[in-house]
Image: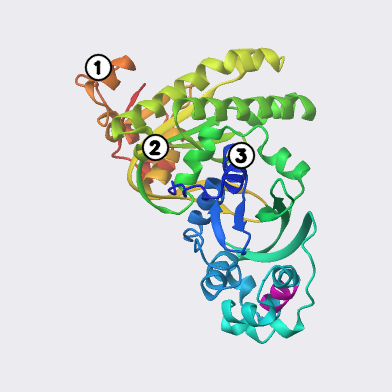
Amino acid sequence: MSESLPLPEDPLLATWASALNDAGYFANILDAGWRYVYDTDELLLSRSYMGVGPPPIGSHFFSAEARQFIARTAGGAWASWDARRAWFLSVGRFVLADTPGGREELRRVVDPQLASLVDELQPEALPPAWTNRSQFEIVGDEVQGSAVLIRIDDAEGRRAGVCVLPKPGAGMSHLATAALTADLTHLSRMAVVARADRRPAAILMADLEASTPLARRLSTAQYFAFGRRLVRTADRCVIDAGGIVGRHAGDGVVAFFLAETDGSESAAARACVTAARALRDTLPAIAARSEIPDVEIALRFGLHWGSTLYIGSILTRGRSEVTALGDEVNEAARIEACATGARTLAPKPLIERLNQEDGAALGLDTHHLVYTMLAELPTATEKARRDASLIPVCDV
């Protein structure tokens, strides 16, 4: 989490900054001299995901420091001279009108690369509000954005500063549809893995048994409604237990429980088992709402522990998801495939992460459990025997 910036010294600007920050907006605050004085926490946090620090507080909006900062934020979209020129000519007319020393003073404070453009500016008073559209780069893609510039005037009508409200190019209807029902705690956990890295974590994989005959028997609409209820319930169980939702593939569920976010390896292992049990316990209710006999719905659960999983988020133009790489991910899939009969199988490396308190909370006597090698299970698949035969597992 990025450290919050101090509020501006000017009381009016501090009031604006505090209100915008409390509401969770992206916002810059500039003073009457067009100098950076504040960024909200959400804007700082978003930039930190891109490896960009806070703005150059006290620097002029067109200074060399500010231009370099904007270049780091905008990425490759800022590389062309045409983009920088268009940005300067668009906003510079308002800045020139507010510069007491006129063109000479503006030439003195701007980045030398922009100084030659000052004579092209036609001064124009900043309106009460104005929109500027721009392009910037994120994870290698060039995207559209916009910002609303709002005059901040004092009680006598003198300009105290400017509020800049950046926004992604998507309209609020799209943003609301994508994020309105999102769990805020889960979003915070996803922020932890915005940058891929090696992280110890428990893995949960679950899949619906006999899904093909069930899908054939039910109407498409009924099966779709059932699948949507199952996925939504699975996500809720994972989130409530302290996990991060992974990819959804067909009727399959993947989730990760990080030692980093759950507090310890033991807590992560406990959360993984807890989520599996919670989802298993909700199946009768899902069946009833879907008008399906509950005997026709069963989930296989395969749990595992990954000491060096490489976990991160993948953001594309079509979706955002958290995924992990490592041998243990493939092994978890093999364990899950062997858990036929609605079993929940967990391996020794996961169970032995549990301390005495967490084991007792789950009702597991971790000192006296007996394990079976995966290949020795009657339900062992050919792939399990080939890839994970010597993994000791037990029912939880």
Q: Residues within 10 Å of mark 3 (few under 14, many from 20)?
A: few
What residue is rendered at 61% in x and 72% in y?
62
Residue highlighted by disc 2: 261
Does label 3 or label 2 sit earlier along the sequence? 3
- Amino acid found under the numbered disc labelled 2: Thr
Snapshot quadrant of residue 268:
top left
Does label 1 or label 3 sit earlier along the sequence? 3
SS under mark 1: loop
- Which residue is most to the front? 156
What residue is rendered at 51% in x and 29% in y?
239
- Amino acid found under the numbered disc labelled 1: Asp
Question: Residue 335, position in %: x, y?
Answer: 41, 35
- Amino acid found under the numbered disc labelled 3: Ala
- Which residue is most to the bottom? 116
Residue highlighted by disc 3: 19
Image quarter where the C terminus lies is top left
Snapshot quadrant of residue 378:
top left
Camera-side residue of 125 and 129: 125
Q: Residues within 10 Å of mark 1 (few under 14, many from 20)?
A: few
Q: Bounds of the magenta span?
A: 84-89
SS under mark 2: helix
- Mark nearest the camera among 2 and 1 is 2
What residue is rendered at 52% in x and 35% in y?
186
Residue highlighted by disc 1: 365
Camera-side residue of 335 and 239: 239
Question: Residue 153, position in %: x, y?
Answer: 71, 51
- Is 321 magenta? The answer is no
Q: Give the alpha-carbon distance from disc 3 to disc 2, as whole Å.
A: 29 Å
Q: Is residue 343 visible?
A: no
